[in-house]
Image (cartoon, rainbow, N blue to C red):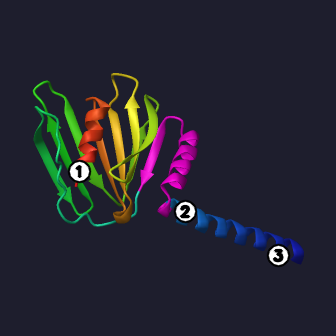
Amino acid sequence: MWQLFKVLQAAASVAIAFAVLLAAAIAVSPSVRAAVVGLVRSWFADRTIYKTQPAVIDGEFTFGYIPEGFELVEATRSENRLLNIYKNSDGESISIAISSGGEQVIDNEHSDYYQVTIVGRSADIYESNDPLYPNIVIVYMDTSNIVVSIISSVDISELVKIAENTN
């Protein structure tokens, strides 16, 4: 009985050490994070969940590029979330959310997923393959624990250009 306890204790210690090392690797390595996102995506065939630790969003964010014809119609801000919504005369909208300390669920069953680097930051692209669903760009601000989400039915290249010009 005592030996069984020691074996279980050793197994628990190894599992805890592995979990700590994996968490550290996810925090500092975009390639490890991409692998983990891919694994989690395989568990949830129709959605991807992004979780961030709480962080205060301070300072100003500027969007150096918004497609022609779009105007800001809503801007809200709290301690850990900034949301800007832009619309054009055709009724199309672009939603830009900067957030931390929460969970964001992306419906991924209607999109093609790939990862890119945008201005030195890891980004997940969900390019819609169904006209009823939007394109989505998720950008990680690694050092500040903030995620930028850009969602719209406009062309994915426009969303990437917005992300490239977000400061």
Q: Residues within 10 Å of mark 2 (few under 14, many from 20)?
A: some
101, 92: nearer the viewer: 92
Q: Is residue 85 above or below residue 128?
A: below
Q: Is residue 87 above or below residue 32?
A: above
Q: Is residue 33 above or below residue 143?
A: above
Chain part drawn in magenta: 27-51
Q: Amino acid at mark 1?
A: Thr
Task: Please report the residue visible at 38 percent of the width from the left and 31 percent of the height from the top.
Answer: 127
Q: Is residue 15 magenta?
A: no
> Looking at the rendered structure, which numbered label has been put on residue 6?
3
70, 121: nearer the viewer: 121
Mark pair 1, 3: CA separation:
54 Å
Q: Is residue 27 visible?
A: yes
The C terminus - image quarter? bottom left
Mark 1 or mark 2, which has the lower sequence index? 2
The N terminus - image quarter? bottom right
Which corner quadrant of the image does residue 85 belong to? top left
Dot 1 falls on a residue whose secondary structure is: loop
Labels 1, 3: front one: 1
Labels 3, 2: front one: 2
Labels 3 & 2 near each other (Cβ < 8 A): no
Instruction: Please provide percent x and percent y for residue 126.
Output: 40, 36
Q: Residues within 10 Å of mark 3 (few under 14, many from 20)?
A: few
Task: Please report the residue visible at 14 percent of the width from the left and 34 percent of the height from the top.
Answer: 87
Instruction: Please provide percent x and percent y for residue 74.
Output: 13, 44
Report which residue position mark 1 lands on: 166
Report which residue position mark 2 lands on: 25
Dot 2 falls on a residue whose secondary structure is: helix
Labels 1 & 2 near each other (Cβ < 8 A): no
Mark pair 3, 2: CA separation:
29 Å
Q: Is residue 44 magenta?
A: yes
